[in-house]
């Protein structure tokens, strides 16, 4: 039986900007409705539902209680989720066969309250581009025990038509006030608050891939995970300008650009792919200027260090301006739309690239990156800084691809081979990264008229180690072969 689905675009914004959008002629609707939604989310003490990828809530609205089960799928803006909804009596869940897969997972006597959301919701229905869109303005709080967190977001739910108008409307909103692509559901926010999972900066999560996927679905899952990684770190970065949040945001962009490179044959005939790649390169460059200084500053002291700290402040100001620009905010919306309904998906020039089994395509990509690394790293210690940097980039692509596709090789033997391969690759990356830091440091020091022997310290030893590490990597059996 076909599962009922919810197609929703989520956007995040500040409360003051929510008010401005509410008053905008763009979103005018004479039949608007206002309500207070109190939603109680339930799970077992062991969080079995969350681990299985489901959420269960009972929402009190306009004097009625509605129970909803959703299959949670990590998204990047556009959420397409199976959902089962029905009215119930009372505010405690009642698990029956009509509640999708939950009746096979738990009984209602096993459940406890996990967290609550209390939201003032204003709903308007907007006709855009032949589609009918429900726009929900949500302003409220999440409560989990004694913990509290503010909640302010827009939900654009597709009631009829195609998804393209959702993104068109989001771009029009972004031109009026700053809105950012949302990557977390209310349930995910609630669990994080309840379990203290907020971290200073978040590393990349494992990519959820299924060996039954084709190449197109695999790329979409990988790219969405990279966007999510970036957006989870961007709020903290904008709030603090901290080095680790900046590093993780930059890694997310680098991983996404690497995914574009790995799936090059799939995207070659999509004209928007190159436009998006250029914008990603621009944003990554803005963050990279700050990251280079973050790496060098701890290695200096005294007046030299103070000079670079001042330079870092200027560079961060430029990076912040870039992050807060309409272009950067729109980039994430454009990426989410392109992943969902871009030409590469809807009208591929060669459908064979899109429909190839993902594992087959992944093995070919991994082998390609390995060959390029071997060729570019030949006689590594004698290469120029530029050519060695090219080898380093290829090592990164191989590393990211190895991480992206890990879920496709999960047998006991495959897992061991993957660990050995990635371990050898990490060692090579560490040495190449240290060499690149020295090359960048020499340029930065000269630019700021600072005399230091740091770039020359241990360079010859690092070159020998990098060359040995490359040799060791090439001797390790590829986990995909």
Image (cartoon, rainbow, N blue to C red):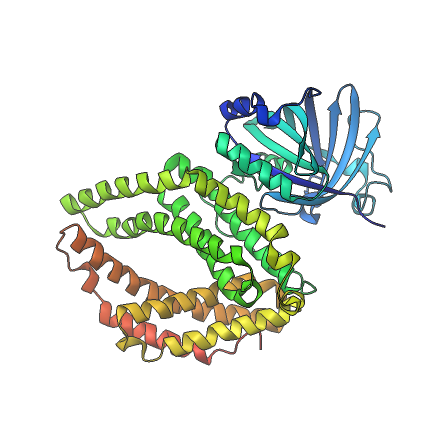
Using the rendered image of the protein, determine whether residue 200 is visible from the camera's viewpoint: no
Identify the residue at image location x=33%, y=67%: 389
Name the residue rendered at 19%, 59% in the picture: 454
**Quarter of the figure that contains the C terminus:** bottom right
Q: Tally the numbered discs.
A: 0
x%, y% of residue 141?
59, 25
- Camera-nearest residue between 378 and 7: 7
Front one among 74 and 429? 74
Horizontally, residue 297 falls left or right of residue 144, namely left
- Indicate the position of residue 218 as horizontal and vertical percent values: 62, 60
Q: Is residue 132 visible?
A: yes
Look at the picture and state if 350 lies above or below 202. Answer: below
Residue 64: percent from left, percent from top: 79, 22
Q: How far across and how far down the image is residue 97, in percent?
A: 87, 42
**Vertical order, 436 against 310 (above or below):** below
Which of 421 and 329 lies nearest the eye of the viewer?
A: 329
Q: Residue at x 56, y 74 (%)?
A: 364
Left or right, 474 with reference to 300: right
Tell me: residue 182, above or below residue 354: above
Q: Residue at x 63, y 72 (%)?
A: 360
* Residue 333 falls in image quadrant: top right
């Amino acid at each position: 039986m076909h599962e009922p689905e919810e197609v929703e675009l989520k956007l995040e914004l500040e409360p003051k900007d929510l008010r401005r959008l509410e008053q905008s002629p763009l979103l005018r609707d004479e039949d608007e409705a206002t309500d207070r939604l109190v939603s109680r989310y339930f799970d077992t003490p062991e969080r079995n539902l969350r681990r299985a990828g489901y959420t269960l809530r009972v929402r009190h609205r306009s004097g009625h209680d509605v129970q909803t089960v959703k299959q949670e799928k990590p998204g990047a803006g556009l959420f397409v989720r199976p959902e089962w909804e029905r009215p119930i009596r009372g505010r405690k869940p009642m698990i029956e066969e009509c509640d999708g897969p939950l009746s096979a997972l738990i009984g209602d006597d096993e459940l406890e309250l996990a967290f609550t959301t209390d939201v003032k919701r204003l709903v308007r229905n907007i006709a855009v581009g032949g589609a009918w869109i429900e726009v929900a303005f949500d302003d409220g709080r999440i409560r989990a025990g004694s913990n509290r967190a503010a909640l302010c977001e827009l939900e654009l739910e597709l009631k009829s038509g195609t998804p393209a108008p959702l993104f068109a409307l989001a771009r029009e909103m972004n031109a009026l006030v700053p809105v950012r692509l949302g990557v977390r559901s209310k349930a995910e926010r609630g669990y994080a608050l309840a379990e203290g999972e907020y971290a200073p900066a978040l590393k990349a999560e494992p990519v959820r891939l299924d060996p039954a996927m084709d190449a197109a679905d695999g790329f979409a899952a990988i790219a969405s995970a990279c966007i999510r990684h970036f957006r989870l770190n961007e709020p903290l970065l904008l709030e603090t300008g901290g080095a680790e949040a900046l590093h993780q945001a930059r890694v997310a962009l680098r991983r996404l650009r690497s995914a574009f490179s790995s799936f090059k044959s799939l995207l070659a005939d999509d004209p928007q792919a190159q436009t998006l790649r250029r914008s990603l390169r621009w944003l990554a460059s803005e963050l990279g200027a700050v990251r280079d200084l973050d790496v060098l500053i701890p290695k200096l002291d005294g007046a030299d260090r103070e000079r670079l700290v001042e330079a870092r402040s200027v560079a961060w100001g430029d990076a912040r301006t870039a992050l807060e620009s309409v272009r950067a905010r729109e980039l994430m919306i454009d990426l989410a739309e392109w992943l969902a309904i871009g030409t590469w998906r809807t009208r591929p020039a060669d459908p064979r690239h899109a429909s190839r089994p993902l594992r087959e395509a992944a093995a070919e990509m991994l082998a390609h990156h390995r060959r390029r690394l071997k060729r570019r790293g030949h006689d590594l210690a004698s290469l120029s800084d530029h050519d060695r940097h090219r080898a380093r980039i290829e090592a990164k692509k191989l590393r990211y691809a190895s991480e992206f596709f890990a879920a496709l090789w999960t047998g006991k033997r495959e897992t061991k081979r993957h660990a050995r391969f990635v371990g050898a690759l990490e060692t090579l990356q560490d040495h190449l990264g240290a060499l690149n830091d020295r090359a960048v440091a020499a340029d930065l020091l000269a630019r700021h008229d600072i005399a230091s022997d740091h770039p020359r310290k241990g360079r010859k030893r690092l070159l020998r180690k990098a060359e040995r590490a490359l040799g060791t990597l090439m001797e390790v059996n590829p986990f995909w072969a």
